[in-house]
Image (spheres, rainbow, N blue to C red):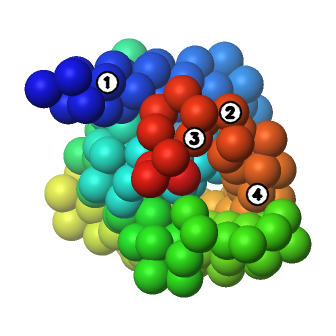
Amino acid sequence: MKKNTRTMAFIAIFAAINYVVFSYLKIDIPLAAGSSVAIHVANAVVVVSAFLLGPVEGGIAGAIGLSIADLLDPRYVASAPKTFFLKFCIGYISGKMGQKLGLAKAENSRQAIKIAAVSAIAGLGFNVIFDPIIGYLFKRFILQINAEAAAIILTWTGGVTAFNAVICVFVSVVLYMALRKPFANLYGKNRR
């Protein structure tokens, strides 16, 4: 029971960090039809939480924290369902890849950096492909935005998502390397 309580507490902490990073450390870019896209590093926090907590737990932390950030910002409120799904997938894919490649058992820092980078690329690469596509379909068919405006939004969203991914791979590896040993001592040796 103590381990479950600790896990839930860390999920809540990482969800809160995700919320703060996205809500207060982003650069908004207004788009057509009242839409916005943002340059941010919150996805790096999703990846790091998946590395430290596990794929499901990290995915849940990212999904909750960033969906709440969307719900509380009028520019992003319509994106909350998409955010919940995509951020969970980023965490799950990154964390699962890290587990499969042996991130927790990396023998040295160089190996851990390589595994963390490849795992982050997997999760964030998924987001680079599916965030613009799901966003386009949502705007076009659910919000009924005309095809030209939806295509413009798709172009901007795709570019900004790719830019964010490149930055977030670097940031997530740096954060993970800084936190892995202290977190292992705090959370338990078997969970890195």
Q: Residues within 10 Å of mark 2 (few under 14, many from 20)?
A: few
Secondary structure under the numbered disc 3 in the rendered image: helix
Disc with the residue nearer the chain's start (4 vs 3): 4
Q: Which residue is mark 3?
A: 184
Is residue 134 shown to the viewer in this render? Answer: yes
How far is disc 4 from disc 3 in space, using C-alphas? 16 Å
Residue 168: % across, % down: 72, 55
Q: Amino acid at mark 1?
A: Arg
Q: Dots 2 and 3: beta carbons under 8 Å? A: yes
Contact flag, marks 1 and 2 (Cβ < 8 Å): no
What label sits on residue 109 in the rendered view? none
Along the horizontal axis of the image, is 43 left or right of 166?
left
Q: CA distance from mark 1 to mark 4?
A: 24 Å
Label 1: which secondary element: helix
Picture coordinates of residue 105, whole percent (x, y): 59, 69
Q: Which residue is mark 1?
A: 6
Q: Are marks 1 and 3 in contact (CB under 8 Å)?
A: no
Q: Which residue is label 4 attached to?
A: 173
| Eye-nearest disc, 1 or 3 | 3
Q: Are marks 4 and 2 in contact (CB under 8 Å)?
A: no
Q: Which residue is mark 2?
A: 182
Q: Amino acid at mark 4?
A: Val
At 86% from the left and 72% from the top, the residue drawn is 110
